[in-house]
Image (cartoon, rainbow, N blue to C red):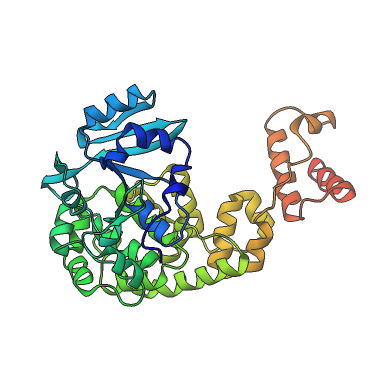
Amino acid sequence: MALKIDPAKWRRRRGMKRLLEALGAADGLTRYVGGAVRDDLLDLPVSDVDLATRLQPAEVVKRLEAARIKAVPTGIDHGTVTAVSDGHPYEVTTLRRDVSTDGRRATVAFTTDWEEDAARRDFTINALSADPLTGEVFDYFGGLDDLAGGHVRFIGDPLKRIAEDHLRILRYFRFHARFGAGEPDKPALDACTARANDLMALSRERIADELLKLLSLADPSVTVGIMLDRGILKPVLPEIEPERLSDLEALISTERQAAIPPDGLRRLASLLPRDAAVADAVAARLKLSNKDRKRLACAAVADLSSSPQSLAYWQGRECAADRLLLAGKAAEAAGIAGWTAPRLPISGGNLIARGLDPGPAVAATLQEIERQWVASGFPEGDRLEEIISKALAR
């Protein structure tokens, strides 16, 4: 693992050089922070780059405008300004310290102390910052050693950090699943277990977002198993029982066989009973979108009596793939991954032209033709004509 970043590579990012100049990086006023630094040190792809600065928010806006960089006050009360430099957005946040917290949000005050700002972050591996000019990495809490050892650890007292933001319970397990090696940090695990009921104070949207991120990782099964053994999810998702872990493990294996990417919603379905009503209730509680709510309920139905293509035609390709993967049918799921449903090659107008009286009979006959056409494997030519003629003769 590298112990510093390549400053030249980072400055080549679109709009970054102008932004650093505007924010006084050469004078030590601004640094790269957080996940971008962590991921770069691990040679992982870096998507979003965040910056922290000693400058007050109003001064940040002033400097950006003077440099003709668009400043969007996305969270200016909490010190965050989005700088759009050469069309690329970067979040710039003034150094902060917590004044008070209630488990969901914090009241902050601005500071110029880098260590004080780092101390309010959740885990040691997320508290790293880097000098944009030299690439030097600043580590106040042993994050570099933890990163090298695959050790996810809270900064300071885990119970205190969880009390500041209850979502850190779920974040801990997500970061352990992604970066951890071996057993979880015992003080962290014990604190998360002791405070699991705190999750009930969070909005269900935040819980859903964090849980789906965790389940979308390459293989979160070991971590999920630890969570189920410790009863972490029981306060908010009592429907998930420890014995469901084997279903998640089987799904992950089937996804890999089918070469289908991980999907958090499908994996959530694997952890739930195969009951559409239960799945719908969970989706409603988590306040999932209507689309995701319908998909979760559809995946919970174990009916595979029709062909994969027929299932995909009536239920949608996504739901069909979910059901097939949950049933361990890798080849069938792979077979419909790129399948496009054909269009019914006849319309109501065609039926009227062939002598059917306009009215309700047209729609009913068309539906019958469609059912037979799909059940027969979407035929053309003589077989299609046979289906149409038979329906018209009734």
Identified at 18% across, 52% down, the residue is 115
Q: Residue furthest right?
A: 382
* The quarter of the displayed image where residue 80 is located: top left
Say if residue 329 shows up in the picture: no
- Which quadrant: the C terminus? top right
Give x and y (percent) for residue 202: 23, 50
Give x and y (percent) for residue 275: 43, 61
Identified at 76% across, 49% down, the residue is 373
Left or right, 295 with respect to 61, comes to right
Q: Residue furthest left?
A: 99
Give x and y (percent) for residue 190: 19, 71
Identified at 81% across, 48% down, the residue is 387
106 and 291: which one is in front?
Answer: 106
Left or right, 392 with respect to 16, comes to right
Looking at the image, residue 64 lies above or below residue 238: above
312 and 127: which one is in front?
Answer: 127
How many callouts does the rendering have?
0
Say if residue 158 shows up in the picture: yes
Give x and y (percent) for residue 6: 43, 53
Identified at 73% across, 40% down, the residue is 365
Looking at the image, residue 261 lies above or below residue 373: below
* The quarter of the displayed image where residue 241 is located: bottom left
343 and 150: which one is in front?
Answer: 150
- Which quadrant: the N terminus? bottom left
Left or right, 233 with respect to 179, comes to left
